[in-house]
Amino acid sequence: MRLIGNILWIILGGIEIAIGWALVGLVLCISIVGIPLGIQAFKMAGLTLTPFGKTVRYGGGLGSTLANIVWVVLVGIWMALGYVAAGVLNCITIIGIPFGLQSFKMAKLALWPFGAQIENL
């Protein structure tokens, strides 16, 4: 199911979104201050490209929490709302439910990326 899900995900728009995240990461990495944000964008690009068969483990300490608060205020809430909207639209049909669940997983990561690690199942 993972392979088929990832292939369909890529065909139906995952590659475009992943490229978008990668470009945002490149732009953010231009300045030294933006490098930590760019790294999080690359993390999102990797998960967005092939989300099936991956899980996100959350952790980190005070530094990650403070960075996540800044992230949420600047861009996180808007990115997460976009993924939630996509997840709700996907879950309208039975066939779309697995894709909706992946969108919800990415919404949580888009909201709180610092200290999170993506792991293969």
Image (cartoon, helix red, strand yellow):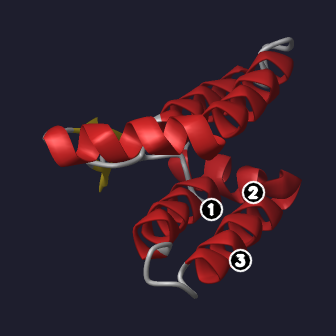
Q: Report x, y in % for residue 9.
A: 73, 51
Q: Amino acid at mark 1?
A: Leu
Q: Report x, y in % for residue 40.
A: 46, 60
Q: Quadrant of the N terminus?
A: top right
Earlier sequence position, callout 2 versus callout 1: 2
Provide the secondary structure element on which disc 1 rests. helix
Provide the secondary structure element on which disc 3 rests. helix
Q: Report x, y in % for residue 116.
A: 30, 46
Earlier sequence position, callout 3 versus callout 2: 2
Q: Nearer the viewer, residue 6 or 20?
A: 20
Q: Nearer the viewer, residue 40 or 98?
A: 40
The residue under label 1 is: 49
Q: Report x, y in % for residue 6.
A: 63, 54
Residue lying at the far bottom of the rendered structure:
30
| Of the two numbered discs 3 and 1 in the rendering, the one whose residue sits closer to the viewer | 3
- Measured along the vertical axis of the image, is residue 65 above or below residue 81? below
Tag count = 3
Q: Are marks 2 and 1 in contact (CB under 8 Å)?
A: yes
Q: Whole-Å distance between the Cαs marked 3 and 1?
A: 13 Å
Neighbor class of circle 3 (other Cα within 10 Å; few <14, some 14-19, many 20+) is: some
| Of the two numbered discs 3 and 2 in the rendering, the one whose residue sits closer to the viewer | 3
Q: Amino acid at mark 3?
A: Leu
Earlier sequence position, callout 3 versus callout 1: 3
- Measured along the vertical axis of the image, is residue 120 above or below residue 81? below
- Measured along the vertical axis of the image, is residue 65 above or below residue 22? above
The residue under label 3 is: 23
The residue under label 2 is: 14
Q: Are marks 3 and 2 in contact (CB under 8 Å)?
A: no
Q: Nearer the viewer, residue 41 or 16?
A: 41
Provide the secondary structure element on which disc 2 rests. helix
**From the viewer's perspective, is 23 left or right of 32?**
right
